[in-house]
Amino acid sequence: MKMIRTLPIALAAIMATLPVPLHAFSQHQVVLGLPPPPGKPSYLPVANSTRSFWFTDPDVVPGPNEGSEGPLTDDADICIIGSGITGVSAAYHLAHALVGNEEVVSGIGRPVKAVILEAREFCSGATGRNGGHITAHQFAHFRQIEKERGVDEALRTLAIEFYTVDELTRILAENGKEDYVDLTRGGRLMLMFSEEELAEEKADYEAAKKAGAQMGDVQWLSKEEVWKTYGAPYPGVLIPGNNLWPLKAVSVLFQLANKTSSRFSVDLHTQTPVTSVTSIPHANANSDIPFLRRHVVNTPRGSVSCSYVLHATNGYAAHLLPHLAGPDGIVPTRGQVMTVRAAVKIDELSTVGGTGNEGFEYWFPRPTKSEAGETPLVVVGGGREVAKGFEIYEVDDSVVNEDVGKALRDFLPIVFPEKYDRDTDPEMEWTGIMGYTQSGDPFVGPVVDSKQISAESNEFDGQFVSAGYTGHGMPRAFACAQVVADMIMADIQRKPFQIPEWFPKSYLTRELPLTQ
Ligand SMILES: Cc1cc2nc3c(=O)[nH]c(=O)nc-3n(C[C@H](O)[C@H](O)[C@H](O)COP(=O)(O)OP(=O)(O)OC[C@H]3O[C@@H](n4cnc5c(N)ncnc54)[C@H](O)[C@@H]3O)c2cc1C
Ligand SMILES: *[C@@H]1O[C@H](CO)[C@@H](O)[C@H](O)[C@H]1NC(C)=O
Ligand SMILES: *[C@@H]1O[C@H](CO)[C@@H](O)[C@H](O)[C@H]1NC(C)=O
């Protein structure tokens, strides 16, 4: 076991050259604004994706290939495309919205029926391949959002994240599932690799505090304090933060959706990619027939008629919604993650997770029992800053990027020199596709295409989307799914939809420039 130096005499000497370039965010935003490379990309998930750690437990229900064989559900009130946290949360919220809303079902005399269609295995998109953090931003980008959209919106962008984290952790606790999903309230240590980054973060923190933002316990730590407690020679800030097993959290939500209300049922068909959505023309489109079938969702296994369609396809949204292709829409971006053993036990490492370099890197130790003599398995991701194009428009998660992999292998041993061994190989390494937007905001609400405005009937009538979380979906997607589920319920009941006080209006679907 290595000795931990307690005296920070020569911290500068310990700071080795980092394996990632600093201050890459502004260049990242430039690249994100460029048109897609010619011929790229195809937005359908590839079939042979890399295996993520989150798929190593074979007992998760529903299983990876649930509903992939036998007859396809050919008719449903609501078709949900995508079985990640967005699609499954939407089913959860629809089930809950029907509790105490008997009149919705009395009109049709049967339960409301939803179906989730998933191109690959259950929850095998970003949610089943991510870094496992579910942490609300406390003040990130606060000044910029306040300047561009005003203080109310800036506060809402924080509020939705607190709401999501509170709700998800509450649901897991109330259903006795905290241990099942390995929920760890370990906190997040955000390391600052430069004076500039530290000053920027502090200014955002001060601005959010001044605006009256709900502030969790935030502690600024000097280089010496971080070194002494966590073993990294950089200043930082400790904020409340959590991590969990994302696939298991989604499986809990699915099971709750399937049993909450006898007025709601949800089928699941995995290995069923949706290749197109076509509309059914009706002479009287405003007909009051409850659940008039307006859409046909086509798959290689057959088609499904439905009244409502929810696109919960995140980075792949542009396949079915081509107007969302390109820099003003949702840009698929490949993220990379690995698991590696630390060199020290959990009591020396601490259960705190972290981020570094403007959030490009993120890591957390998986819960481990020290008595077992094991050193913790650490989940670490990021490294896109070393790739020439930041992995933007890369949609193939069947491969890893070697350069990104090298930077990730070096990252923890360089940042925490006494906690990790540089010659320890990762145990697993995988990729996944995120959905980036230039503003960082997702698109949430009815599908809007400005080219359709003058058309007599809107082919998107009854279609909704919630996608584009820009690598930060765990503390937002559940709440965004609640908003689209509530919009669908309001439409069914012909009632106006009320925006919750925690929901940023800037997330609502917006018309894209006609030049697209
Ligand atoms: C490597 C990586 C690390 C990340 N780390 C974190 C993190 O630590 N914390 C955090 O908050 N966020 C993180 N994210 C982002 C987070 O995972 C996403 O924001 C979130 O999971 C999005 O959920 P979703 O349900 O909208 O999308 P997804 O989970 O991607 O689900 C979309 C689903 O739709 C399916 N699909 C797509 N097209 C079709 C089609 N045509 N027909 C049928 N099915 C289709 C896909 O197969 C997929 O299963 C990370 C993402 C990645 C990739
Ligand atoms: C996975 O399939 C895609 C096509 O869907 C192909 O381009 C890619 O090379 C395959 N990857 C591997 C590792 O076989
Ligand atoms: C949903 O619940 C029903 C009734 O308990 C059950 O038969 C069905 O298998 C469940 N669906 C899935 C996909 O687990």
Image: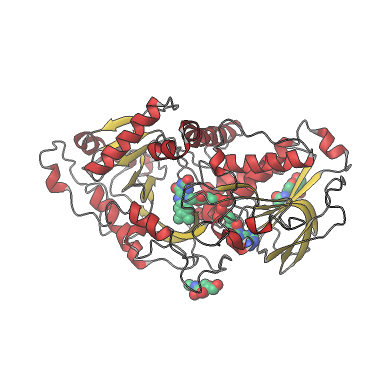
> Which residue sits at x=47%, y=41%?
134
> Is 131 situated left or right of 309 in this image?
left
In the picture, residue 172 is in which quadrant? top right
The percent position of residue 389, horizontal first and vertical second, equals 38, 64
Apparent side of residue 197 relative to residue 183 in the rendered image (left or right): left
Q: Hey, which residue is sitting farthest left in the picture?
A: 9
Residue 82 lies, in percent from the top left, at 63, 55
Residue 460: image quadrant is bottom right
Please give the count of numbered marks on the rendered protein: 0
Closest to the observer: 43 or 344? 43
Task: From this view, report whether residue 95 is shown above or below residue 398.
Answer: above
Residue closest to the eye, 221 or 427: 221
Most foreground residue, 304 or 179: 304
Q: How is the image coloured?
A: secondary structure
Q: Is residue 256 visible?
A: no
Q: Within the image, what quadrant is residue 352 found in?
A: top left
Q: Residue furthest front?
A: 454
Residue at x 24%, y 38% (from the top left corner) = 235
**Above or below, comparing residue 169 to residue 285 in the picture:** above
193 or 400: nearer the viewer: 193
Q: Is residue 346 visible?
A: yes
Side of 116 relative to 230 (left or right): right
**Which part of the image, by quadrant, shows the C terminus?**
bottom right
The residue under the point 78% across, 55% down is 306
Relative image position of residue 290 (x, y in whole percent):
85, 45
